[in-house]
Image (tube, coloured by chain):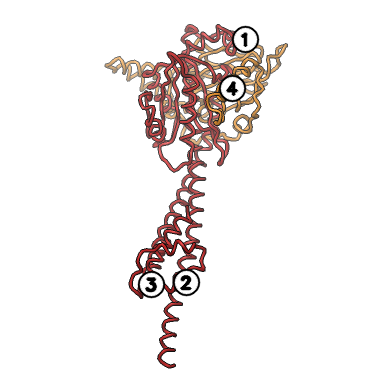
Chain colours: A red, B orange
Amino acid sequence: MASAFLRREARRLGSLTASGTLKALTGSPWPQSAIHQTQELPAFGSRTISTQIVRNRMKSVKSIQKITKAMKMVASSKLRAIQIKTENSRGLWQPFTALIRDVPGISVKKNVFLIVTSDKGLCGGINSTSVKISKTFAKLESGPEKEPKYIVLGEKGKSILQRDSSKDISLSVGEMQKNPINFTQVSMLVDDILKNVEFDAVRIIFNRFQSIVSFVPTVSTILSAEVAEKESEAGGTLGDLDSYEIEGSETKAEVLQNLSEFHIVCALFNACLESSCSEQGARMSAMDSSSRNAGEMLDRLTLSYNRTRQASITTELSEIISGAAALTG
Amino acid sequence: MLGRRALCSLLRPSVSSVRVGGSGAVAGRRGFADNTPATATDAAHQDFITAWKKVAPNMEPPKTPLTFMKPRPVVPGSIPTKLTINFVLPYQVELSSKEVDMVIVPATTGQMGILPGHVATIAELKPGLLSVHEGSDVNKYFVSSGFAFIHANSYTDIIAVEAVPLDKIDREQVQKGLAEYTQKLSSASTDLERAEAQIGIEFHSTLNASLSG
């Protein structure tokens, strides 16, 4: 990509320099054909304009490099802050998984996929990975009387999903990251979801933060109270749930209902934190590679700038000297 | 479930220490192998992976929380001597895999004591006093609502939305809050205000009782 840009630059340079300097430039790495594909040559003596163009280009690339470096610093500082919170919240969903194992392959009628994505872009491919996984899940669970529904957290996921499954999106939430994520906010969100969406099983799809360079797509399956009760009575994977006594004044169904709601809130809280951690980490690495690319581009532009400058100086000198030689001898 | 703001107003102005160190044990390195004792889950998981591969052969199947969890021990034959508890909050892991003698949790039916060998139970918690007894020292916390799971292998998980060690709570603030909510109840006009005032009174009186008890 950089070489195509340079070829274009060479074409523009070629159109402005005199034909004599073209011979000097052919020693450069650009192919001769690129230079000869020029438009008509301008008047003699218009040499300073070419260096001007390259200089402008260099200025813009340098500012891009500064911006991406700054974005990387911002992302790394945000990551540090949120990483502590994420690690602390990791203990939250473990008791639930110990009690009600996680069965991703469970097949129920009403599937709801809760995708956690980011609001802002420039963070690599994590959002598209999550959406791809949820679409594959929907295909996996598709069949007669099974309609998948999507709940999207984050603007990026919404825009990706809207392209082909906009009718399946039942709820979309934006601006989650405006204030730091806290438990109350997530519980209110889940309250909202439970009121509006009916489901048998909700699958939370997010990117788990393993390290600054590795984000693992993870899916957390949570069953609604009725399905959990049915499965536990049927035995199998959730069989031990039946063996647990319920301590409380309410019936088993009510306790299971509260349990499932609490489970969703805890899992979603952890998922949101992990997802924003992954977003900052992905943005860090994306900005890092883009500032490195900008640096390389800057190097190549500097080389071409120097060559153009030296070529024009050589031309001037040669003209002066040949003129002087013509006069004297 | 009561939120954070209610408890925050009662904390003494002193800075509470951030307990991050303890979280390393549970939240840090986790084994990747899924060697939980239930073979039924493994089979179900394998079915899921094969089904996934059929639909999307080029995509890696997503991981599930089971891969990221330390496996729990199997149910032992005899009653173990100590109870292992995990006490987690959304913002930190208070206690992880701590061996204690007894735990008293504020279940909805009243204070419930948990000893090693307790039958497997799911208990819903109401705001109240939680005390952890280890030998001769007792740690007391005031918890807002949550859940307590007692597994058959004498592992207890306590999940609460908020928990504060008792010595961090300011007694005068509690009294002030109680008076304030009693006054609000008498001046309440709508059902909503009455309900809020009642919740406030119940909460503050429980706090008061646990501070003195």
Residue A47: mark: 3
Camera-near label (1 vs 3) is: 3
Q: Which is more N-terminal, label 3 or label 2?
A: 2
Q: Are marks 4 and 1 in contact (CB under 8 Å)?
A: no
Numbered disc 2: secondary structure: helix
Disc 2 chain ID: A
- Tell me if mark 2 has few (under 14), some (14-19) or many (20+) residues whose alpha carbon lies within 10 angstroms of its own: few
Tell me if I can see residue A119 in this picture.
Answer: yes
Tell me if I can see residue B157 in this picture.
Answer: no
Give how far apart the Cα atoms at labels 2 and 3 are. 15 Å
Camera-near label (2 vs 3) is: 2
What's the amino acid at mark 2?
Lys
Whether discs 4 and 1 lie on one chain: the answer is yes
Q: Do the residues labelled 2 and 4 touch (CB within 8 Å)?
A: no
In the shown orientation, is residue A133 left or right of residue B139? left
Q: Position of residue A265 (x, y in %)?
A: 46, 23
Q: Quadrant of the C terminus of chain A?
A: bottom left
Instruction: Identify residue for label 2.
Output: A23
Q: Which is more N-terminal, label 1 or label 4?
A: 4
What's the amino acid at mark 1?
Val
Instruction: Identify residue for label 1.
Output: B119
Instruction: Identify residue for label 4.
Output: B50
Disc 3 chain ID: A
Question: To which quarter of the image does residue A110 belong?
Answer: top left
Q: Which of A273 and B47 is in front in this view?
A: B47
Numbered disc 1: secondary structure: loop
Q: Position of residue B193 (x, y in %)?
A: 31, 18
Disc 4 chain ID: B
Give how far apart the Cα atoms at labels 4 and 1 are. 37 Å
Q: Is residue A219 above or below residue A308?
A: above
